Each structure stands twice: as C-alpha cells, then as structure tokens.
Image (cartoon, grey):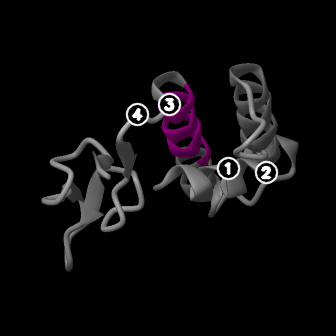
C-alpha cells in the first residue's frame, strides 16, 4: 500500500496529516469496522487489517519524509513492496530494494 492509498483508506489529507490525525483516523476506522459497533462481521478482519496497514504506511511516511535528491519509486508507488502474482504475500521491489525511494 502506498501513502496516497493509505490516506484514502483512513480519509486523511496526505499533505497536511499529522501523526495525531493518522492515529485518530485509525481509531475511527477500527471502531467503525468492529462488529460490536455495527461493522459487518464477515468483513471486519479485512477492514481492521487494512486500517492498521494504512496507519503503519502513513506513520512511516510521516516519520521519514523524502530525502533530498530522492523521489517515490514509480514501480511500487513508494511502498517498497510488490505483490507476488498467485500468492498472498509481497516481496521487496527490485527497483528501490524495498526502500520506496529512488534517486532523481
């Protein structure tokens, strides 16, 4: 998941989001997805995992920033991971070596 998609999942603005905004949006998403609060029991585990993954991606994005002379990897959209076709796992992006950034 790239930072742009993670921001969409949590409904935060990627340009202005703070750590507190991300954590608050994650708590709201988890609360809404939980079956005890009206979330769909069949989708709850998927939605909870998606919210937590989005949180991790955004917090990593906010903490690192982009180093000067670098840009997000276009192959993996800055996530550093590519899905393996036909499997339920991901592997490090061969272009950025799992870092999510490449030289300009």
Q: Which mark is residue 65?
A: 3
Q: Nearer the viewer, residue 14 or 71?
A: 71
Judging by the rendered image, the residue that carries numbered circle 2 is 11
Q: CA distance from mark 3 to mark 2?
A: 20 Å
Disc number placed over residue 68 in the picture, else none: 4
- Mark 4 and mark 3: span between their CA atoms? 9 Å
Q: Position of residue 37 (x, y in %)?
A: 86, 43
Residue visible at 34% across and 57% down in the picture: 73
Name the residue rendered at 75%, 34% in the picture.
Answer: 17
Task: From this view, report whether residue 6 is shown above or below residue 43.
Answer: above
Q: Which-is-in-front pick, marks 4 and 3?
A: 4
Compared across the picture, whether 90 is left or right of 30 comes to left
Q: CA distance from mark 1 to mark 2?
A: 6 Å
* Mark 1 vs 2: CB contact within 8 A: yes
Distance from Cα at disc 1 to Cα at disc 3: 15 Å
Q: Is residue 89 left or right of residue 40?
A: left
Residue range highlighted in magenta: 51-62
Q: Residue at x 55, y 29 (%)?
A: 59
Q: CA distance from mark 4 to mark 2?
A: 28 Å
| The stretch drawn in magenta includes residue 56 | yes
In contact (CB < 8 Å): disc 1 and disc 3:
no
Residue 103 drawn above or below residue 74: above
Task: Decide: few, some or many residues near mark 2? Use Cα within 10 Å; few <14, some 14-19, many ≥20.
Answer: some
Residue bearing the label numbered 1: 7
Place of residue 83 in the rendered image (x, y in percent of width and height, measured from the top left): 27, 66
Q: Earlier in the sequence, mark 4 or mark 1?
A: 1
Mark 4: give few (<14), some (14-19) or many (20+) Cα within 10 Å.
Answer: few
Q: Single out the mark in the foreground, 4 or 1.
A: 4
- Magenta includes 30? no
Q: Earlier in the sequence, mark 1 or mark 3?
A: 1
How many neighbours does mark 3 have within 10 angstroms: few (below 14), some (14-19), or many (20 or more)? Answer: few
Going by the picture, which residue comes out furthest to the bottom?
Answer: 86
């Amino acid at each position: 998941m790239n930072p742009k998609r993670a921001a969409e999942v949590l409904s935060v603005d990627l340009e202005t989001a703070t750590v507190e905004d991300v954590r608050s949006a994650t708590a709201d998403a988890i609360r809404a997805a939980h079956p005890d609060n009206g979330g769909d029991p069949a989708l709850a585990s998927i939605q909870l995992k998606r919210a937590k993954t989005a949180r991790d991606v955004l917090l990593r994005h906010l903490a690192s920033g982009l180093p000067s002379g670098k840009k997000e990897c276009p192959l993996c959209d800055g996530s550093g991971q590519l899905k393996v076709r036909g499997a339920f796992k991901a592997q490090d992006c061969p272009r950025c070596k799992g870092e999510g950034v490449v030289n300009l």
